[in-house]
C-alpha cells in the first residue's frame, strides 16, 4: 500500500503539489490524470524519492519512505518514463538485468530472468538480447523499458506517461500488454497520463489532479457518472460520456442469460462499446454472448445497452 | 576490431609503429643519404645523443605529462560536474578556455624563470598545458549524457557512484579520450620545443639544427617527431573506436 499523506512540493514560491492525500491499495491500477503542470509527474516522482517532498509523508506498506535509503527503495519499484532512458551503451540483456545486477544476483539467474521478461513483452529473447537500444524501434525500446522495470519482480510499478511518445497503434498494443501484465501479476501500478481514453482503458482507480490539487478519486465509472466539477467534466469530455461509460462496462453486466442469439457471438468480457460497435457495423440489435471458453451463455440486446 | 584481427598485416597502426622504431634505430645508417643531400654540411648526422636515447626521453616526457594531465584533468572535470563542485565549474571553464588561447611556447617560457632549466620545468609546463583539453572535454562529455538516461539510472536505484562509473563515464569516454588525444599530440610537439629549456628530446636536433643552420639535423628531428605523433594519433583513433564500439552494432 502506498500512502501519500498531506504531501506538498514547493519550488520557491510556486506550489507544484498542494496537500495531496491519496491511498493506493495493493494490486490497484491507479491512474493519475491531469493536464500538463498539474503536478502528477511530481507526485509520482515523490513516491520513489526522486523528488523529496517539502511537507507531508509518503508511506510504503506503512513505512515512511524518507527513512529508507533511496537506492534501496527504487530497486523495489519499477520505473518507466516517457523518454524511456535505456542505457545506450548496454545491450538489451544488460539493460533488462540492470536492477538484478545492482542487487547482486548471479549471472545465470539474471540471464534466465531476462529471457523470461523479453518473452513476456513479446520480444524474441534470442533475437533481441544482444541488440543495442539504437537498433530497436521506439515501441520495442519501451517494451525493453518495461522489462527493465519488472526485472527484479517489484511489487510496485511507477509509470510516467510511458506511452506518450508512441504512435497510436504501438500505444494501443502496449496498453493491452501492461493491462495483461497487471491482470496476471496483480502488481500495484501507479500510472501518470493526460489521456482520458488511456486512463479509462487501464485504471481500476483514477485520481484527477489540477494545479497541484487532487480533485477527485474513484473508479472509472464513478468519475464518468459523477464528475466532481467542471474540470473533471471537461477532462472526461461531455460529448463522449455516454460512449466512455460503455467502454468501462462489460457485456456480462447487461446480458440476458440462457437466451440464444444470431451467429458471430461476442465474449462476455468485451466492453459494451465494442458490442455496440459490432451491432452498428452488422446492422443487428442482438448479439449472441459466449464465455471466455467460447460456450454460449446468453444474448445481448441493444435496448439493454442503452438503458441505464 | 574484428577486421584488424583478421588482417593484422594491414593494420596501419602496427606499420607506422614499426616504421617509427625502425627510423629511431636505423637513423645513423642514413648518414650517407643526408651527406649526399646536403653536401655542404660538415656534420650531416646529429650525433651528440643517440636517437634511441632522444626518443626514449621524448616518449617519457610526453608519457608522464600526458598521463598526469589525463588523471588530473578527468578528476577536475568530474569534480565540477558533481553537486559538490558545481560552484567551481564556471571558473574552471573560464580558466580552461583562456589557458588554451596561450601558445605552448609561452607556457614553457613562463616555466623557466619559475622552476629553472631542465626536464622538470618542461614536465610541469606540458602537464599544465595538457590539462586544458582534457578538462574541457570531460565537462563536455559528461554534459552530453542524455538527461533521460540519468533519470533512468537513478530510477533503477543506482547510486551517484554507480551512475558515474557505469553510465556517465562510459558514455562520455569517446569525448574524454578525444581530449586526451589532443592533449597528447600537442605535448609531442611542445616536448620538441622543450629542448629550448634544457630538456633533451627529439626536438634537440631541430633546435640545434635551426641554431646552426643545419637542415639535416632539423629534418632528422622533424621526421621522428612527426612519425611519433602519427603513431600516437592512430593509437588514440583505435581507443576512441573501442570506446564507442556499441554505436556500430
Image (cartoon, coloured by chain):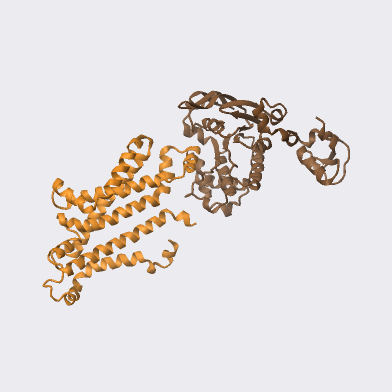
Chain colours: A brown, B orange
Q: In this view, does B64 lie above or below A275?
A: below
Where on the picture, by quarter, is residue B78? top left
Where is residue A305 drawn, in percent x and y? 81, 35
Residue depicted at 26% across the width and 68% down the height: B22
Which quarter shows the C terminus of chain A? top right
Closer-to-camera residue (B151/A269) = B151
Is residue B154 at least partly visible in the picture?
yes
Closer-to-camera residue (B240/A285) = A285
- Left or right: residue A20 compared with residue B94: right
- Left or right: residue A194 compared with residue B24: right
Where is residue B85 drawn, in percent x and y? 34, 36
Where is residue A6 drawn, in percent x and y? 55, 22
Q: Looking at the image, how many numbered discs can be counted on the residues?
A: 0
Which quarter shows the N terminus of chain A? top right
Q: In this view, does B245 lie above or below A230?
A: below
Where is residue B210 drawn, in percent x and y? 15, 64
- Left or right: residue A287 compared with residue A160: right
Where on the picture, by quarter, is residue B194? bottom left
Residue depicted at 59% across the width and 49% down the height: A140
Is residue A269 at least partly visible in the picture?
no
Instruction: Name the residue furthest left.
Output: B42
Closer-to-camera residue (A254/A210) = A210
- Left or right: residue A206 compared with residue B101: right
Residue depicted at 64% across the width and 35% down the height: A186
Amino acid at each position: 500500500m502506498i500512502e501519500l499523506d498531506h504531501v506538498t512540493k514547493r519550488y520557491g514560491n510556486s506550489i507544484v503539489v498542494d496537500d495531496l492525500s491519496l491511498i493506493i491499495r495493493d494490486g490497484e491500477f491507479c491512474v493519475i490524470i491531469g493536464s500538463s503542470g498539474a503536478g502528477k509527474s511530481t507526485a509520482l516522482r515523490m513516491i520513489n524519492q526522486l523528488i523529496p517532498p517539502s511537507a507531508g509523508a509518503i508511506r510504503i506498506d506503512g513505512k515512511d519512505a524518507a527513512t529508507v535509503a533511496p537506492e534501496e527503495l527504487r530497486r523495489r519499484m519499477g520505473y518507466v518514463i516517457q523518454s524511456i532512458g535505456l542505457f545506450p551503451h548496454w545491450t538489451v540483456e544488460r539493460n533488462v538485468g540492470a536492477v538484478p545486477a545492482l542487487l547482486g544476483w548471479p549471472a545465470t539467474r539474471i540471464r534466465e530472468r531476462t529471457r523470461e521478461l523479453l518473452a513476456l513483452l513479446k520480444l524474441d529473447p534470442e533475437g533481441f538480447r544482444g541488440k543495442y537500444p539504437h537498433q530497436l524501434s521506439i515501441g520495442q525500446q519501451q517494451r525493453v523499458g518495461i522489462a527493465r522495470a519488472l526485472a527484479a519482480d517489484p511489487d510496485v510499478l511507477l509509470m510516467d506517461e510511458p506511452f506518450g511518445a508512441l504512435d497510436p497503434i504501438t500505444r494501443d498494443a502496449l496498453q493491452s500488454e501492461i493491462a495483461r501484465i497487471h491482470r496476471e501479476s496483480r502488481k500495484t501500478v501507479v500510472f501518470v497520463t493526460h489521456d482520458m481514453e488511456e486512463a479509462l482503458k487501464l485504471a481500476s482507480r483514477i485520481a484527477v489532479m489540477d494545479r497541484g490539487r487532487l480533485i477527485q478519486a474513484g473508479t472509472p465509472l464513478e468519475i464518468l457518472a459523477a464528475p466532481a466539477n467542471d474540470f473533471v467534466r471537461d477532462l472526461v469530455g461531455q460529448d463522449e460520456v455516454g460512449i466512455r461509460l460503455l467502454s468501462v462496462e462489460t457485456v456480462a453486466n447487461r446480458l440476458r442469460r440462457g437466451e440464444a442469439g444470431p451467429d458471430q457471438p461476442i465474449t462476455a468480457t468485451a466492453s459494451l462499446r465494442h458490442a455496440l460497435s459490432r451491432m452498428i457495423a452488422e446492422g443487428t440489435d442482438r448479439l449472441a454472448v459466449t464465455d471466455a471458453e467460447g460456450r454460449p451463455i446468453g444474448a445481448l440486446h441493444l435496448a439493454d445497452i442503452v438503458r441505464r | 576490431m574484428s577486421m584488424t584481427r583478421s588482417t593484422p598485416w594491414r593494420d596501419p597502426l602496427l606499420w607506422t609503429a614499426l616504421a617509427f622504431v625502425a627510423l629511431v634505430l636505423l637513423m645513423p645508417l642514413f648518414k650517407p643519404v643526408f651527406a649526399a643531400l646536403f653536401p655542404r654540411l660538415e656534420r650531416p648526422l646529429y650525433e651528440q645523443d643517440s636517437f634511441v636515447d632522444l626518443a626514449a626521453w621524448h616518449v617519457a616526457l610526453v608519457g608522464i605529462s600526458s598521463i598526469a594531465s589525463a588523471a588530473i584533468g578527468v578528476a577536475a572535470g568530474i569534480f565540477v560536474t558533481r553537486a559538490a563542485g558545481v560552484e567551481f565549474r564556471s571558473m574552471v571553464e573560464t580558466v580552461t578556455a583562456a589557458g588554451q588561447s596561450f601558445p605552448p611556447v609561452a607556457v614553457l617560457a613562463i616555466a623557466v624563470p619559475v622552476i629553472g632549466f631542465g626536464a622538470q620545468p618542461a614536465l610541469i609546463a606540458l602537464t599544465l598545458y595538457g590539462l586544458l583539453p582534457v578538462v574541457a572535454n570531460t565537462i563536455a562529455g559528461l554534459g552530453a549524457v542524455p538527461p533521460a538516461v540519468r533519470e533512468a539510472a537513478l530510477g533503477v536505484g543506482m547510486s551517484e557512484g554507480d551512475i558515474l562509473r557505469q553510465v556517465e563515464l562510459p558514455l562520455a569516454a569517446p569525448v574524454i579520450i578525444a581530449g586526451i588525444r589532443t592533449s597528447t599530440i600537442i605535448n609531442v610537439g611542445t616536448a620538441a620545443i622543450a629542448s629550448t629549456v634544457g630538456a633533451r628530446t627529439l626536438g634537440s636536433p631541430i633546435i640545434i639544427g635551426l641554431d646552426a643552420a643545419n637542415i639535416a639535423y632539423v629534418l632528422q628531428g622533424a621526421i621522428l617527431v612527426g612519425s611519433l605523433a602519427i603513431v600516437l594519433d592512430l593509437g588514440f583513433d583505435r581507443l576512441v573506436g573501442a570506446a564507442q564500439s556499441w554505436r556500430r552494432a
